[in-house]
Image (spheres, rainbow, N blue to C red):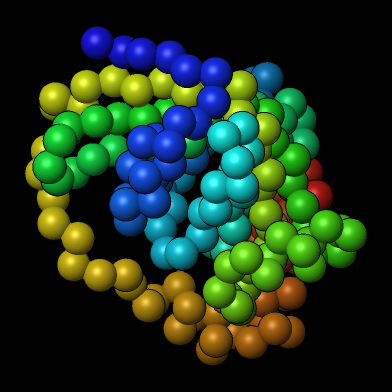
Amino acid sequence: MAKQFEELLPEHTDFINAQHLFFVGSAGAEGFVNVSPKGMDSLRILGPDRLIWLNLTGSGNETAAHVLENGRMTIMFCSFDKQPLILRVYGRTDVIHPRDDSWDELVDQFPDYLGARQIFDLDIELVQTSCGFGVPYYDFQGERDTLTNWASKKGEEGLQAYWTEKNQLSLDGKATGIR
């Protein structure tokens, strides 16, 4: 049932663009594996072999630590309506911070979210689709505004302090590169 592709095909791009939710998986050589759900308007496909996603401030920063260690990442999309399908994108990624030269060029592709802390630039090595027959139906009701409201209340200075306090080390004690 699973099929593999060297790059994103137009139908893969259409499928990804129709999803409201995706999952990011990463792991270091040792320690915890991280899987994070992502939403909002935070992913862009730049070509059949490249995509970027904007990482907003959260309680942890595991993905950044894993990427600094080995660059591996998997992004998974699931259809919760219509035709069942799971699409995984595997590759190597670079983490880009607001201090980096390419930040301004890439961040302009997203809404102006307060609390944007990194962009992950994924070089796609493999695309795999599978059936998704076991994925349940769910209805999209809308985006939550909780994260953007939280960031607004913190303000830029409060977010910087939060990054220093909560986002510099992973659960495994590995540096995230945020500072």
Residue 51: percent from the left, percent from the top?
Answer: 59, 43
* In front of the other: 155 or 106: 106
79 left or right of 31 in image: left
Residue 40: percent from the left, percent from the top?
Answer: 42, 64
Q: Residue at x 60, y 78 (%)?
A: 112
Task: Kindly tell me whether residue 27 is visible in this rendering.
Answer: no
Residue with the most extreme front position:
10
Which quadrant holds the C terminus? bottom right
Vertical order, 6 against 60 (above or below): above
Which quadrant holds the N terminus? top left
Vertical order, 145 against 178 (above or below): below
Q: Residue at x 18, y 44 (%)?
A: 80
65 left or right of 77 in image: right
41 left or right of 21 in image: right
Residue 53: percent from the left, percent from the top?
Answer: 58, 52
Vertical order, 41 against 36 (above or below): below
Q: Residue at x 71, y 60 (%)?
A: 106
Q: Residue at x 12, y 42 (%)?
A: 82
Residue 9: percent from the left, percent from the top?
Answer: 45, 31
Task: Kindly tell me whether residue 166 is visible in this rendering.
Answer: yes
Q: Quadrant of residue 99?
A: bottom right
Q: Quadrant of residue 135?
A: top left
Give the tally of numbered discs.
0
